Image: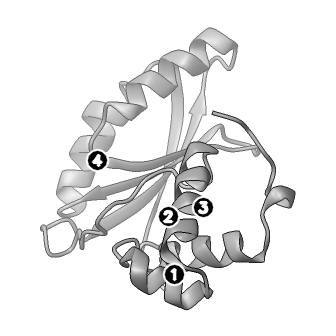
Amino acid sequence: MTNPDQSQLDQIDRRILEELARDGRISVAELSRRVNLSKTPCQARIKRLEDQGFILGYRAVIDPTRLGLPHVAFVEVRLSDTRKAALEAFNKAVRALPEVEQAHMIASSFDYLLKVRTKDIGAYREVLGEKISALPHVAHTSTHVSMEAVKDDAE
């Protein structure tokens, strides 16, 4: 896979990406119509954009509230050690926690910001106490509970 930068994308490539981001299940025929391109060249562009890593995949967006997981908390995590091996150990372990929806390394007074989704505050407390606090090199956590998602690009 090559690693081109976004400057190599023309207006049609960008439009294809916009349309697929809006609706990943759009047919190639409809996508071709929307970007004013015939079907075969449109398919070739999609394949190239996939091969070049601009399109990482396609997925269904699931409503976690309908699955009984409405509680969202953001957890600041400070590590006791931030050397490469410690970061790798933490990264590997946090990826294995299904309750952690997102994990970001942050340039701040803390090291990571985790988005954690559970059924309620009690379940969150258990995840925090038994799983997150037990991750490698965790020295301190601080929790922020979401009251409402005002903007969520996954929806």
**Secondary structure under the numbered disc 4 in the rendered image:** loop
Q: Nearer the viewer, residue 86 or 1?
A: 1
From mark 3 to mark 4, how far is it between C-alphas? Answer: 36 Å
Q: Are marks 3 and 4 in contact (CB under 8 Å)?
A: no
From mark 1 to mark 4, how far is it between C-alphas? Answer: 39 Å
Among the two numbered marks 3 and 4 on one chain, the one whose residue lies closer to the N terminus: 3
Among the two numbered marks 3 and 1 on one chain, the one whose residue lies closer to the N terminus: 1
The answer to whether residue 155 is visible is no
47 relative to 110 in the view: left or right:
left
> Which x, y percent locates residue 52?
64, 45
Residue reaching furthest right?
7
From mark 3 to mark 2, how far is it between C-alphas? Answer: 5 Å
Q: Which residue is mark 1?
A: 32
> Tell me, what colour scheme is on the image?
one colour
- The amino acid pointed to by label 1 is Ser
Q: Which residue is mark 3?
A: 45
Q: Which residue is mark 4?
A: 99
